[in-house]
Every structure is written in structure tokens, then in C-alpha cells.
Amino acid sequence: MTIEVQHIHKQFGQFTALDDVSLKFPDGELTALLGPSGCGKTTLLRVIAGLEHPDSGSVLLDGQDASHHHVRERQVGFVFQHYALFKHMTVFENVAFGLRVKPRKERPSEQQIREKVKQLLELVQLDWIADRYPPQLSGGQRQRIALARALAVEPRVLLLDEPFGALDAKVRKELRRWLRRLHDDLHVTSIFVTHDQEEALEVADQVVLMNKGRVEQQGAPGDVYNKPASPFVYGFLGNVNLFHGRVHEGVLASGDVTFNAPQFAGVRDGAGIGYVRPHDLDVERYTPGAEGVVAKLRRAHAIGPLAQLDLERADNAQLIEAVLPNERFASLGLKEGETLVVRPRRIEVFVDQGEGI
């Protein structure tokens, strides 16, 4: 099913949760709604589900306006962060619940319900705990049961609100890989909310970045990470170093160093910031006359395949983080306190257009 929202606006008192949001969610794809707390992503999910009604705008399901359709009519499966399983029911009964409460004319026979639940429990790889109760399960198991229950009614759309938010890091990583595999098997159009950029980039077919009730960028994970459309996107997706300065005729001057920004050749003395990812910095021992950002190595953390260097700029004492392969770090033989020079292999410059950056 294709989902489209058009010009959605939602206000809670004086707070604008959604500000003229228009998006298309492709059929059969897994989309992540990503952004900080309060950016509107959960409100948007609830509007699509029919649990929240927008002040204006419309929700289209397969091209049909569903704005005034009840939740049940939208055929949506919803998975919440905190499981929402019935504690007094067994795993089997929890998954069967949605089928048992269907109107009599649509309700499957008892035999069909048993077969369906068995299939779903096998799908989420938990058929061996059908007789247990939710309090006897781990958090990861409970969330997979919640997903099986949502799938039982054969939803046309699957909506997940921070589905792994209540779980520890190791279980989260396992479950998001599992969710990706499950989605590849089922191909049900799915939207999930997260504030975890790693989760969104790893699992989703496309990512929608939201901020203050608006869409900042929408695209494939690689596109939003490698070609951020705004300073907000650059800053939100992973660690980044900021080089504050002035842009004049295609050059950003920051402290004692300059960076080319040919796309701003027409700008004269504008406030600008250069964004550089830690892994996009080349690091060498300083020699007199070397071009680049001169900095002192304050701390090196070299565990695992990567070494993280904390550097302090010589010209303005700003901290810089650089990441390089541990083999490269070892071959350089760097010591804390040494003076180094760093050069960005890639820098993205944004100029203040009057709205602040």
C-alpha cells in the first residue's frame, strides 16, 4: 500500500507538532521517521494510523482519502515501545486477540485462528513459548510477540513507534537486524519512529529527517548521510566537527585556515560553518610550513579497529575529533601532547541565509 500525507498541520495548544508536512511512503518499503524528541514523528505516525486527527491536511491510502476513516477501517498494525501485551493472556492468546475480536462475519474459524497464530509464532521464531505469559518473557521476546500480534490481522500498513526503545543496546541491535529480515520476507509497507540515527540508517529503505514539526530531508540512508540538505541533518546524523568562520567569494576563513567553498562565490562576508566528519580528516605530524589545521593531540583512544583522537586547535583552542584506522595510528607513533596538522578530505560549507545555522 502507498501512503501519502498532504499538508498535515497539528497543533496542541500553542505547540505546533506538525507544520505543513507532505510526504509519500512507497509501497512495500520500510521508512524511518527520525529526529529528536518533540520533532513530530510520533504525532505523524498517529495521524497516519487514525489515532490522532490533524487540524488540516489529508491522509491518502492507495490514493484514497482516509482522513475520516476509523482506525479499524485503515487496516493498520501498530507496535508501541512498551509492548502493550495483555499480562493475563498467554503468548498464544495475545497473538490471537485481534482475530478473535473481529466482527462475526469476518472472524476466522477456531481452527484457522490456531493455524494463523502458529504460523506467526514460527515467523517471529517464538513458537516454543506459546503457553507462557508476558511477565515470563524477556523484553526482546515481548516485542517480537507484539509484532506478531500486529501482523495477525494482516495489516496493509505496519506502524512501529520506537519499537526497540525500551531495550538494551545489544538486544536492540539483534532485533533491528531481525526486523529487516522479516520485512524483506513480508514486504508490508512499514513506517517506524526512532531517534537513533544508527538504527534508521541500518534498517530503513528510506529515512525522513524531522525537526520542529517539519521535514528536513527525505531519501535513501546513504543519500541523507553523505549529502545532508541542511546543517541540522549534518549535525544529527553522526559526529561532526564544526569550523565556524566567514565566507567571502567562495572561501571560508576559520581562524588561521581557509577552505574552498566555490558554490558560494557570490557571497561576501557571510557567516558560515564548515562541517567535517571525524573520519574525513587526514592526520599527520606537524612540520613547519605545513598547510592545514594545526592542533595538539590531547587524548588518543585506540581500542578496536579505529583510533579516536581528541585534538585542540592551536589558533582558537576549539576541539576537533578525528578517527583513523588503528594501523595508521600505530604506524604514526603519535604521543599525547604532540603537535599535528589535520586536513579535511571533504568539507561541506553552509552559509547563514538569515535564519541562523
Image (cartoon, rainbow, N blue to C red):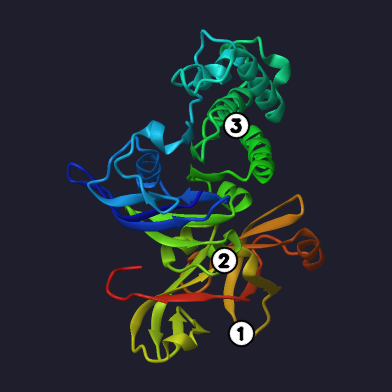
Please give the count of numbered marks on the rendered protein: 3
Counting residues from the start of the chain, the first of labels 1 and 2 encountered is: 2
- Residue 2 image point, x, y percent: 48, 52
What's the residue type where badge 1 is placed? Answer: Glu
- Residue with the most extreme left position: 14
In the rendered view, tell whether residue 27 sits above or below residue 120.
below
- Residue 353 image point, x, y percent: 31, 76
Which quarter of the figure is the C terminus placed in?
bottom left
What's the residue type where badge 3 is placed? Answer: Asp
The alpha-carbon separation of the residues under discs 1 and 2 comes to 31 Å
For image coordinates 51% across by 7% down, the residue present is 88
**Viewer-side label of 1, 2:** 2
Circle 2 residue: 223
Circle 3 residue: 168
Circle 1 residue: 291
The alpha-carbon separation of the residues under discs 3 and 1 comes to 45 Å
Rendered image quadrant of residue 22: bottom left
Callout 3 touching callout 1 (CB < 8 Å): no
- Residue 292 image point, x, y percent: 59, 80
Rendered image quadrant of residue 170: top right
In the rendered view, tell whether residue 235 sits above or below residue 87.
below
In the picture provided, is 328 more to the left or to the right than 219? right
Q: Looking at the picture, tell me which residue is in the foreground, 12 or 53.
A: 53
What's the residue type where badge 2 is placed? Answer: Asp
**Viewer-side label of 3, 1:** 3
